[in-house]
Image: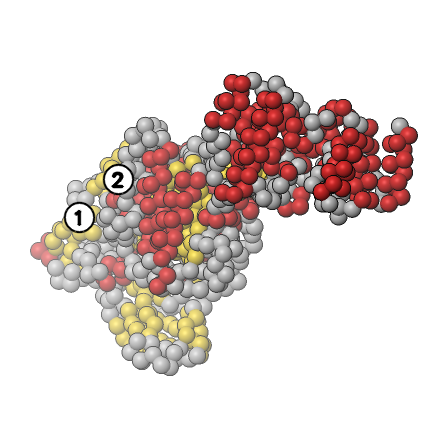
C-alpha cells in the first residue's frame, strides 16, 4: 500500500491521474439483409470497433491474450515488478529497449492517455495501472482492455477484430484464430492480416503462442496439432459499396447512439447492384439527350423493405452533383399522380372505369381571374375516352376534368395522408395542375403512395432495418377503387394507342406501370409493381435543365422494366408470376359500348367488358350510337314536320356538343347538332346565339415575327336555328359573316378587344367577350 501511495503521489505531481475506465463510442456495422458488409459508421477517433465484449469472456481469448501480454496478470496489482527488473537488466545489457515489461493494466493506461515513452510516462502508467486494479479489479480491467486494444486497420477491441478478420463471434474462435488475434496488439501497424508480410508475422507469432501454451500444458497435444494444421480462414478486406452511399449515409444518421452495434438493413446487395447497373446503363444511352443523373429504389411489397436504394448515378460525380440524394429530393412527378385522382373519382362514385371523358380542347378558370388552357403532351386530342383508356394513355385533359369534379383539396388531403410532406392547401398553390405535376414529391414518397395501389388502398411504410417494427399504413383509397386502378394500370389494351405494343410498359406477366414527365422534359419517372416488388426510377438534372424529349415512357420506363424483370423472380422463385391483376369479387361485370361506356345499343359495333363498383354500373342505353332522322335537302336533323319523302333515317354517331369541333377536325361522320329550318323540331325555333370561343378574359401573345396567316385566334358560336348566318364584331366593327358551323379565324392585333356575334337576320347580339392581346 505504501508503494502504491508513493507511485500515485509521484504520478499526480507529474501530470495527474483519473483512475477511470474511459468508454469509447463504438462503431456501427451496417450489413445487408443477408449479412454482407455494406459499410461502417466509425466510433471514437474515427476507428472501427470499441464493441462491448460479453460479460463471460471465452477461455481461448483470455488464455491467448494473457499468454501474449501478461502471463502473471492475476498475480500482481497492476505492475509486475520482477518483469520490470528483468526488462531493465535486458535493456541495459543490450544498450537498447528490447523489453517494456508493460502489464495489461499499464497498456490500458497508455491507451487511455497516450504519451511519449519516457521514464516519467512509464511511472505514470504504472501508477495508473495500480489505481485501475485497485478500483475495478482484474476481471473488469481485462474486459475493458479487450474492448479498446488495437488490432490493426483502425480496428479496436477483440469482438470487432473477430468479426472483421474471421466474420465470427469471439465465442466461435479456434485456438489458432484466438492466438492470431492475441498477437496483433503487439504490432498492430505491421501485422495486418491483409498483407502478405503482416499476415506471416502474425501467424508466426500465433504459432509461438500456441507452442508456449502447449509447453506449459495449457493445451493438449491434440489441440496443438489441430491448431497448427488448421486453416486460419481470414476473410477478405470488406469493401464499402459506393453504389449504396446515400443509403449508408442515411442509415448512419439513424444508428448513431444506438445500443446495438451490428445493424441488418433491408437492403439486398445483389438487388442493389442490379439496380445500380441498370440505372447507369440506361443513363448512358440518354446522356446525348441531356440527362446527367438518375435514381431509383426497389421495395418488397409484403413488408415495405427497401431492397435497393440508389440516390444518384455516381456519388463522387461533382459535375452532376452526385452527392445529392435524389430519392429525397422533391421534383415534379408529371403524370405520376394521375392514378390517385382517378382512384378518388372511382371511390366517390363520380366516375366509373367506363365513364366517357372528353379529351378535347378546354379552358379552366383559375382563382384570381384568368384562364388555364391545358395541352396533352402530344398536342393532339382523342375525343371521347373511357376512364380506363384515359388513364392508360395518360391523357392530361381528361385527368384535369376529373380533378375538377373530385376537388383539389380532397386529392391533396389524400396525398398528405399517404406521406407526402409540405403539402400546401392555399387555393393558388397547385390548382388543377396538381394532376400533371404541380405537387413536387420525392421518389421515396411516390413509392409509398404506390404501395397503396398494390395493397388494396393502404400504404405500406418503407422500412430500412430488419429489426424495425412494422409501422401502420394509411388508407388513402378504398379497397375497390385501389384494386380497380391497379387493374387499369396493368391493362396493356388500355394503353393503346398512346404507348406501342412491345414497348417498355408491356410485360409478360401482370405489372401495373405508370410514367410521368414534368413540364419541359425536366424529369422522367416510371413506377412499376407486380405482386412482389415495386420499382421507382427517375432521370433528370440537378439544376432542372431540360432534356431533349426524354419522357417517362422513353427514358425512365426501360430501366424500371429491366429492374423489375431481373429482381421480381428472385423474391419468390418457387411461385408462378401473377398473370392478371386481381379484382375484388364484389365488383360487377358488364358489357358496355367502347365509346360511350353505356349499355350497348343496336348501333354499337364495338363493345368491351368492364368492372364496376356495386351501384355504379350503367343501366341506360348508349346515347352516342343512335338512329337519326336527316333532312335530305340540307343534311340537318329532320323535325317531326318534315315530309317523309325528304327524310332518311341513319345510324350515326351522335356526340355531345363538346365533341363537335374535334369530330369535324377528325372528319368523322357524326349526326348534325342543328335541326333543319325547313322542318324544325318544334313549331317555331326562337333565335339564339352564344359565343363559345374565345372565353372571357383570355390573353394572347402577339408575335410580330409570326406570319399573319398563322397569327390568328378561333371564334366559334352556338346558333339556333343552325342554318342562320351570323356576323362577327370586333370593337363594334364587323370582321366577317359566316354560316354553319359559325366559326372564323381572326388575325391578332395588340390591345384590348371586345368580341360580339350577331344573328344576320334577326339582329340578336351576344354579350360582350373581352380579350387582351399582349405584344
Q: Can I make out residue 230 in this image?
A: yes
Q: Secondary structure at mark 2?
A: loop
- Nearest to N terminus: mark 2 or mark 1: 2
Q: Quadrant of residue 696?
A: bottom left
Within-10-Å neighbours for mark 1: few <14, some 14–19, many 20+: some
Q: Which residue is tagged 1?
A: 627
Say which of 353 and 718 sits in front. Answer: 353
Q: What quarter of the picture does the C terminus occupy?
A: bottom left
Closest to the camera, between mark 2 and mark 1, is 2
Left or right side of 770 for 388: left
Residue at 24 percent across and 48 percent down: it is 502
Q: Are marks 2 and 1 in contact (CB under 8 Å)?
A: no
Name, please, the residue furthest toward the left.
645
Residue 365, x across and y down, in percent: 45, 60
Q: What quarter of the picture does the N terminus occupy?
A: top right
Q: Which residue is tagged 2?
A: 508
Left or right side of 1 for 321: left
Q: Is residue 577 above or below residue 548?
A: above
| Count of marks, rendered view | 2
Q: Can I make out residue 298 in this image?
A: no
Left or right side of 102 for 626: left
Task: Tell me the number on the disc at residue 42.
Answer: none
Residue 397, x across and y down, in percent: 36, 55
Residue at 24 percent across and 70 percent down: it is 739
Say which of 743 and 704 sits in front. Answer: 704
Work out how far the residue at label 2 is from the one at label 1, CA to CA, in angstroms: 43 Å
Residue at 82 percent across and 40 percent down: it is 123
Q: Is residue 246 above or below residue 66?
A: below
Amino acid at each position: 500500500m505504501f508503494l502504491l501511495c508513493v507511485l500515485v503521489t509521484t504520478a499526480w505531481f507529474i501530470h495527474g491521474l483519473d483512475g477511470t475506465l474511459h468508454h469509447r463510442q463504438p462503431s456501427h456495422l451496417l450489413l445487408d439483409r443477408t449479412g454482407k458488409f455494406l459499410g461502417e459508421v466509425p466510433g471514437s477517433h474515427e476507428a472501427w470497433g470499441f464493441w462491448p465484449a460479453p460479460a463471460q469472456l471465452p477461455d481461448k481469448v483470455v488464455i491467448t491474450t494473457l499468454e501474449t501480454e501478461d502471463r502473471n496478470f492475476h498475480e500482481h496489482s497492476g505492475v509486475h515488478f520482477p518483469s520490470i527488473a528483468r526488462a531493465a537488466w535486458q535493456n541495459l545489457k543490450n544498450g537498447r529497449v528490447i523489453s517494456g515489461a508493460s502489464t495489461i493494466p499499464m497498456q490500458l493506461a497508455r491507451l487511455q492517455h497516450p504519451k511519449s515513452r519516457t521514464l516519467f510516462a512509464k511511472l505514470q502508467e504504472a501508477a495508473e495501472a495500480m489505481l485501475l486494479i485497485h478500483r475495478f479489479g482484474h476481471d473488469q480491467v481485462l474486459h475493458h482492455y479487450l474492448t479498446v486494444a488495437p488490432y490493426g486497420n483502425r480496428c479496436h477491441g477483440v469482438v470487432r477484430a473477430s468479426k472483421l478478420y474471421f466474420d465470427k463471434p469471439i465465442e466461435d474462435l479456434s485456438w489458432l484464430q484466438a492466438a492470431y488475434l492475441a498477437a496483433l496488439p503487439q504490432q498492430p501497424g505491421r501485422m495486418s492480416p491483409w498483407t502478405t508480410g503482416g499476415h506471416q508475422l502474425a501467424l508466426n507469432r500465433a504459432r509461438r503462442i500456441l507452442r508456449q501454451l502447449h509447453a506449459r500444458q495449457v493445451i493438449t497435444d491434440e489441440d496443438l496439432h489441430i491448431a497448427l494444421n488448421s486453416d486460419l480462414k481470414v476473410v477478405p478486406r470488406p469493401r464499402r459499396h459506393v453504389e449504396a452511399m446515400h443509403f449508408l449515409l442515411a442509415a448512419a444518421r439513424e444508428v448513431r447512439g444506438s445500443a446495438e452495434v451490428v445493424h441488418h438493413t433491408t437492403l439486398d446487395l445483389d438487388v442493389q447492384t442490379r439496380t445500380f447497373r441498370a440505372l447507369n446503363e440506361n443513363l448512358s444511352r440518354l446522356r446525348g439527350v441531356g440527362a446527367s443523373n438518375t435514381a431509383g429504389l426497389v421495395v418488397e411489397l409484403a413488408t415495405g423493405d427497401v431492397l435497393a436504394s440508389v440516390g444518384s448515378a455516381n456519388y463522387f460525380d461533382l459535375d452532376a452533383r452526385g452527392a445529392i440524394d435524389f430519392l429525397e429530393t422533391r421534383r415534379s412527378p408529371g403524370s405520376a399522380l394521375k392514378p390517385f385522382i382517378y382512384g378518388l373519382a372511382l371511390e366517390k362514385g363520380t366516375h366509373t372505369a367506363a365513364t366517357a371523358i372528353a379529351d378535347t380542347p378546354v379552358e379552366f378558370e383559375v382563382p384570381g381571374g384568368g384562364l388555364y388552357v391545358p395541352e396533352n403532351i402530344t398536342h393532339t386530342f382523342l375525343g371521347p375516352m373511357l376512364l380506363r383508356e384515359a388513364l392508360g394513355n395518360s391523357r392530361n385533359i381528361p385527368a384535369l376534368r376529373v380533378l375538377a369534379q373530385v376537388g383539389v383539396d380532397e386529392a391533396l388531403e389524400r396525398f398528405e395522408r399517404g406521406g407526402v410532406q409540405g403539402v400546401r392547401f392555399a387555393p393558388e398553390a397547385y390548382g388543377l395542375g396538381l394532376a400533371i405535376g404541380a405537387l413536387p414529391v420525392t421518389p421515396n414518397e411516390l413509392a409509398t403512395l404506390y404501395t397503396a395501389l398494390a395493397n388494396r388502398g393502404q400504404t405500406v411504410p418503407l422500412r430500412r432495418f430488419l429489426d424495425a417494427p412494422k409501422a401502420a399504413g394509411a388508407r388513402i383509397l378504398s379497397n375497390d377503387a385501389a384494386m380497380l386502378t391497379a387493374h387499369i394500370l396493368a391493362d396493356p389494351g388500355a394503353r393503346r394507342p398512346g404507348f406501342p405494343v412491345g414497348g417498355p410498359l408491356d410485360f409478360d406477366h401482370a405489372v401495373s406501370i405508370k410514367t410521368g414527365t414534368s413540364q419541359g422534359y425536366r424529369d422522367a419517372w416510371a413506377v412499376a409493381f407486380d405482386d412482389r416488388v415495386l420499382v421507382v426510377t427517375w432521370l433528370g438534372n440537378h439544376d432542372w435543365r431540360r432534356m431533349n424529349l426524354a419522357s417517362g415512357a422513353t427514358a425512365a420506363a426501360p430501366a424500371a422494366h429491366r429492374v423489375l424483370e431481373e429482381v421480381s423472380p428472385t423474391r419468390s422463385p418457387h411461385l408462378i408470376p401473377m398473370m392478371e391483376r386481381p379484382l375484388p369479387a364484389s365488383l360487377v361485370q358488364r358489357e358496355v359500348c367502347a365509346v360511350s361506356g353505356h349499355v350497348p345499343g343496336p348501333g354499337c359495333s364495338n363493345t368491351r367488358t368492364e368492372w364496376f363498383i356495386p351501384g355504379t354500373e350503367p343501366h341506360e342505353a348508349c346515347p352516342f350510337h343512335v338512329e337519326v332522322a336527316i333532312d335530305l335537302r340540307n343534311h340537318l336533323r329532320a323535325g317531326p314536320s318534315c315530309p317523309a319523302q325528304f327524310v332518311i333515317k341513319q345510324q350515326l354517331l351522335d356526340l355531345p356538343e363538346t365533341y363537335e369541333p374535334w369530330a369535324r377536325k377528325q372528319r368523322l361522320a357524326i349526326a348534325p347538332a342543328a335541326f333543319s329550318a325547313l322542318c324544325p323540331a318544334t313549331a317555331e325555333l326562337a333565335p339564339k346565339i352564344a359565343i363559345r370561343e374565345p372565353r372571357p378574359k383570355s390573353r394572347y401573345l402577339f408575335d410580330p415575327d409570326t406570319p399573319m396567316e398563322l397569327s390568328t385566334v378561333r371564334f366559334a358560336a352556338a346558333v339556333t336555328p343552325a342554318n342562320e348566318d351570323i356576323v362577327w364584331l370586333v370593337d363594334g366593327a364587323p370582321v366577317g359573316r359566316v354560316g354553319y358551323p359559325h366559326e372564323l379565324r381572326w388575325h391578332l392585333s395588340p390591345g384590348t378587344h371586345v368580341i360580339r356575334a350577331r344573328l344576320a337576320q334577326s339582329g340578336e347580339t351576344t354579350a360582350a367577350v373581352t380579350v387582351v392581346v399582349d405584344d
